[in-house]
Image (cartoon, rainbow, N blue to C red):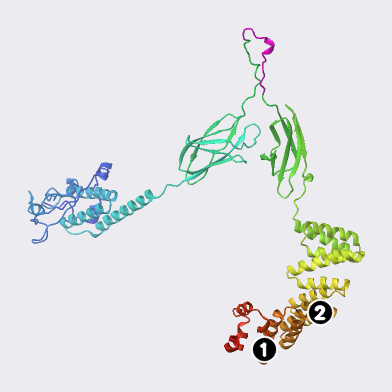
Amino acid sequence: MASPFAAGQPTEADYNTIDLGDPVTSADVLRPVELGVEVTCPPETGTPSGSPARTSGPSSVPSEVQPASSRAAAISPGSDSRESASATVDTPPVTPTATDLAAKKNSNFKATLAGGVLGPQASTRVAAQHRADARTDGGPRPKQRSKILGYAAATVFAAIVIAYLVAQKPAVGTITGVVVDAQTGRVIPSATVEFDGKAAAVTNAAGLYMFGDIHSGSYRVKASAPGYQPQTGTVQTSAPQPAQLSFALAPLVESTLAPATQTTPAGADSAQVTSSTTTSPAYGGVDLTVDFEGYLVFVDGEIYGKNARKLKRLTAGEHRIVLQVDGYQDYSTTVTVKARGTSTVTIAKADLSPRIDPIKRSRGLFAEGKDYLDKGLWQPAIEAFDQAITFDSQNADALRYRGWASLKSGDTAKAAADFSRAAQLYDDTKRLMDAVTCAGYLIDLSPGDPGLWRTRGDYHLGLTEYAKAISDYERAIKLDKKSVENQMALGEAYFASGDFRRAAKEFDRARKMSGDPVKPYIRMILAYYRAGDNDELMKKYRDFTKVAPQDLLKQLQNDPEWLPVLQMIGPEERHKN
């Protein structure tokens, strides 16, 4: 039979112009596929003798996918493979016509779609079917095979992505809102908000509520509060985006009930029967006249609203109204509300007191006091420093300069107290130069006090000003020659300066003066060790072991500073003790 194509064999252009037939239906896409193997006898034409029998796709693929001349029995899951292998065809295969090729391409295209939905195994079978058919029809077509494989890969990837997305946890969002009074705009705390008839929340002090873990969809939300008509609304959510739904509840209408009607029992005196009248609470309001924005209003300790100007439904009587404004102290006032009346409260920005940073305020007052001090105005300066210290009791500069102003005004006792306190604060904050200055003021006031000289010597020692420290300690010793503390301080100053021999001598003097020579001994032995005087070290160590408690000697064995001394002494000398 002559080929329907001009060249006898179809070209790629001819193959692509074949009508694919009717569109694919859902039945075609979702048709179940069972695995099977089709075995055919060697074809009489189109296949070289001795070539292996080709395998086809699943037996359940529509018959138009396989040429009528090459269909054979499929191996079912429960059949014997040997019986299937011996099956023969009814009609030998013939050269395909153009109609056969069109039907084959249309069926392969449908099978490709089915493979994309059913999984990679079905797609692989379709590709294998196409390769076998291409060989039967006169040789392979690489480009067309690449297209089929591309379709299969794309559908497999799409199936994986869809499965991944389906496996993910659905996104959730939130629903938030505020519940307010429809007439006054005042927030309603403790209002009940019901979500979809299943869950409920209570608004906080600011009238806010929130529901979490909400999936996308449409929900009904209901808000209610005592004294208000309930309200229901619908909110559409699109997780994970938050949704908002607020409520403005209308107050219930108040009415005065008529006197209750009572029946007089037989024989009872009508005067003994009383009737009562129930009335609703009397309400009034307050108008706020405010010349600024950005404030919160609190009534009797509860938030009323932001930038509220009309406060309604307040019970008759006194109410405390507070305004909170950023940067200012809270403004508070008490107003009397009359039944069915409206009171007016006027608040100007000038009525608000700025919120003061005590540290900054203290520094400002200190600068003011120093300016008075420079002008010789001692009393105004003292008053300014007083206020500065009131705002910041740790303001050492204000204490120091107030002491100086008091000294100039003749109050030496107050001046000494301020200088002493300022020196202590300077020492605590490591401002030792200022501490030295205050100690100098104190020495000027009391030059015969050895403790002041020793204190200033300590400040000098902290500044590593060893010569000045030694000078102050020597002056303290001259004023109090029996002070072990002054003598030890002088020894420490020489030790810190590196003069260890002189330090050892000063510690030895302290040892002779002290009723408890243990500490002077330890410092003296360490000074001799640092000086490299082993003879004196051994001599003083033997004397030390005679007066030192045994538990102290054991403790010193673990002292890092004392270990070199023990190594210098040696184990033989240590064991004597």
Residue at the location (77% across, 46% down)?
352
Residue 365 percent coordinates (x, y): 82, 59
Residue 212 percent coordinates (x, y): 50, 44
Residue extending furthest bottom? 535
**Label 2 secondary element:** loop
Q: Residue 340 carries which label?
A: none
Please report the bounds of the magenta region as a residue range.
265-279
Residue at the location (88% across, 71% down)?
445
- Residue 186 at least partly seen: yes
Tag 2 residue: 482
Depth order, front residue of 94/461? 461
Depth order, front residue of 337/346? 337
Category of crowding for the residue at label 1, using alpha-carbon neighbours closer than 10 angstroms: few (below 14), some (14–19), many (at least 20): many
* Amino acid residing under circle 2: Lys
Tag 1 residue: 537
- Residue 405 at least partly seen: no
Point out the image quarter for the C terminus. Answer: bottom right
Category of crowding for the residue at label 2, using alpha-carbon neighbours closer than 10 angstroms: few (below 14), some (14–19), many (at least 20): few
Depth order, front residue of 57/133? 57
Depth order, front residue of 348/256? 256
Left or right of 91, for residue 120: right
Q: Splitting the image into 4 quarters, where does residue 299 fall?
A: top right
Q: How far apart are marks 2 and 1 (CA)?
A: 26 Å
Left or right of 156, for residue 98: left
Q: Splitting the image into 4 quarters, where does residue 13 fall?
A: bottom left
Considering only vertical position in the picture, is 509 above or below 383?
Answer: below
Residue 211 percent coordinates (x, y): 51, 42
**Label 1 secondary element:** helix
* Amino acid residing under circle 1: Leu
